């Protein structure tokens, strides 16, 4: 998952706290920007002044008397999703990017939203797989046990050939809606993994994830489809958590990828064995209680 | 009578008249109290810097949660005569009657303490 560092432009414009609002307005207008981080004599961030602040202040005022002192900052290594969460939780439009106590840039909500849009599947409106990996790594880094439910539509290639891709797409969209209705938004991450494959990341043990997988398979089979064919899913489950020294970003990414792969193989095996849900070998970890907020 | 300009006149004459008023600059120019309006040309930080520059450590800046005034700059010596909670509400109330948020109001405050005591004779 890309970090916000990729959104930073090479040009950074700042202003001193003791400059006038008039000058801040001129700098913003000249560079076509909507805000400026405000620095003190030591070059440290002390505030932010926006075009709205400028409009509401006398041009003779000091920037220090017109700026907002509450600045929400973010590290350039933060993921797009973390930035998105910060913008939402503080109900703001901009984040100041700070590295080693030095301002290195500004990112806006529209930049983050546009970038995140690249990770949304345009057909189903679900996340793409990158988001699932990013969240998996984040949960693993916090020491959580996670499970992946990998779901694959059965004989979807044949359905596409028999009825055409338009009908195939409609089935994908409806399947996505059914799966989404069974997930808990604050807890689970559902993505369209590939063509006819979906995956759910959930911070629950494999046994609970298997229950979720069974529910999903049942719901899709129970749907009244407009085509005279049986639409079904095969689900594979894999779960696990961080162990030993596996705490570097690379290790955690490998662990997440390993779980997705194990779940994917389990789903293929479930399809071969004609069972709805199969839990990957070695994934039957002891029941671990997730933190209270997840259980709630 | 001013000379009449005719076609045959030379170049018109121009003169400048200077009126100079000299008086002593008052230090500090803030007097006793400054009430800083929310949309005034100077804000609290500028006011603080100004009084600190001309009268170091003699004034205190107090931020206000007020509809019109953003801050008040008050001479510390006044606060030794009268506590803040007695002095400031009165000054703010009176300032409120005449000012709007675009203004900086300068106030001169004279405090006289009246004491009447009796002793046994």
Image (spheres, coloured by chain):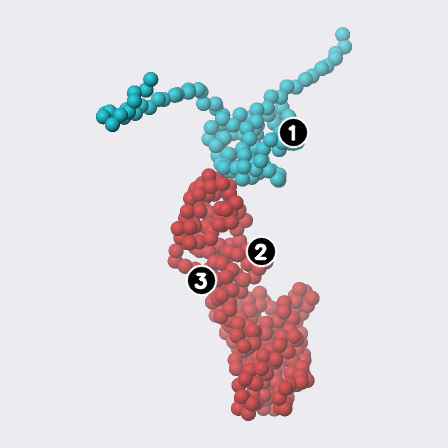
Chain colours: A red, B cyan
Chain letter of the residue carrying label 2: A
Q: Which residue is mark 1?
A: B90
Marks 1/3: CA–CA distance: 53 Å
Q: Residue at x 71, y 15 (%)?
A: B116
Q: Which residue is mark 3?
A: A7
Residue A90 tag number: 2
Q: Residues within 10 Å of mark 2 (few under 14, many from 20)?
A: few
Depth order, front residue of A4/A68: A68
- Sequence-first disc among 2 and 3: 3
Q: Residues within 10 Å of mark 1 (few under 14, many from 20)?
A: few
Q: Residue at x 44, y 43 (%)?
A: A22
User: Would you say the residues marked 2 and 3 are in contact, meaning their CB atoms lie under 8 Å apart?
Assistant: no
Which numbered mark, 1 or 3, is in the foreground of this view?
1
Depth order, front residue of A52/A242: A52
User: Which secondary structure lies at badge 2?
Assistant: helix
Which numbered mark, 1 or 2, is in the foreground of this view?
1
Place residue B87 in its image quadrant.
top right
Res B121 seen here: yes
Q: Residues within 10 Å of mark 3 (few under 14, many from 20)?
A: some
User: Would you say the residues marked 1 and 3 are in contact, meaning their CB atoms lie under 8 Å apart?
Assistant: no
How many badges with numbers are in the image?
3
């Amino acid at each position: 998952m890309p970090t916000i560092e990729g959104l930073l432009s090479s040009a950074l414009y700042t202003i001193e706290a003791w400059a006038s609002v008039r000058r801040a307005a001129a700098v913003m207008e000249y560079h076509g920007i909507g805000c400026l981080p405000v620095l003190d004599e030591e070059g440290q961030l002390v505030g932010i002044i926006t075009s709205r602040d400028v409009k509401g202040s006398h041009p003779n005022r000091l920037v220090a008397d017109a700026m907002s002192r509450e600045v929400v900052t973010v590290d350039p290594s933060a993921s797009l999703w973390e930035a998105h969460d910060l913008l939402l939780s503080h109900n703001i439009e901009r984040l100041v990017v700070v590295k080693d106590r030095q301002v290195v840039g500004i990112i806006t909500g529209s930049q983050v939203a546009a970038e995140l849009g690249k990770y949304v599947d345009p057909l189903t409106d679900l996340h793409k797989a990158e988001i699932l990996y990013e969240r998996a790594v984040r949960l693993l880094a916090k020491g959580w046990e996670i499970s992946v439910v990998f779901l694959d539509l059965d004989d979807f290639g044949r359905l596409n050939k028999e009825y055409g891709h338009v009908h195939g797409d409609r089935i994908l969209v409806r399947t996505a809606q059914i799966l989404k209705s069974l997930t808990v938004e604050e807890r689970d991450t559902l993505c369209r993994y590939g063509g006819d494959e979906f995956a759910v990341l959930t911070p629950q043990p494999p046994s609970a994830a298997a229950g979720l997988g069974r529910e999903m398979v049942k719901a899709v089979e129970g749907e009244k489809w407009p085509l005279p064919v049986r639409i079904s899913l095969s689900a594979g489950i894999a779960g696990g958590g961080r162990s030993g020294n596996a705490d570097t970003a690379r290790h955690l990414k490998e662990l997440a990828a390993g779980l997705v792969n194990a779940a994917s193989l389990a789903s293929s095996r479930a399809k071969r064995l004609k069972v709805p849900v199969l839990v990957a070998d070695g994934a039957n970890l002891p029941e671990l209680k997730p933190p209270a907020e997840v259980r709630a | 009578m001013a000379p009449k300009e005719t076609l045959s006149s030379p170049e018109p004459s121009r003169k400048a008249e200077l009126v100079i008023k000299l008086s002593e600059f008052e230090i500090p120019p803030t007097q006793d109290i400054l009430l800083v309006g929310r949309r005034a040309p100077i804000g609290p930080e500028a006011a603080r810097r100004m009084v600190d520059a001309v009268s170091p450590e003699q004034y205190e800046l107090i931020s206000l949660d007020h509809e019109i005034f953003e801050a008040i700059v008050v001479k510390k010596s006044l606060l030794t005569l009268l506590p803040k909670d007695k002095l400031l509400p009165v000054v703010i109330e009176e300032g409120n009657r005449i000012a709007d948020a675009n203004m900086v109001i300068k106030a001169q405050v004279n405090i006289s303490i009246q004491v009447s005591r009796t002793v046994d004779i």
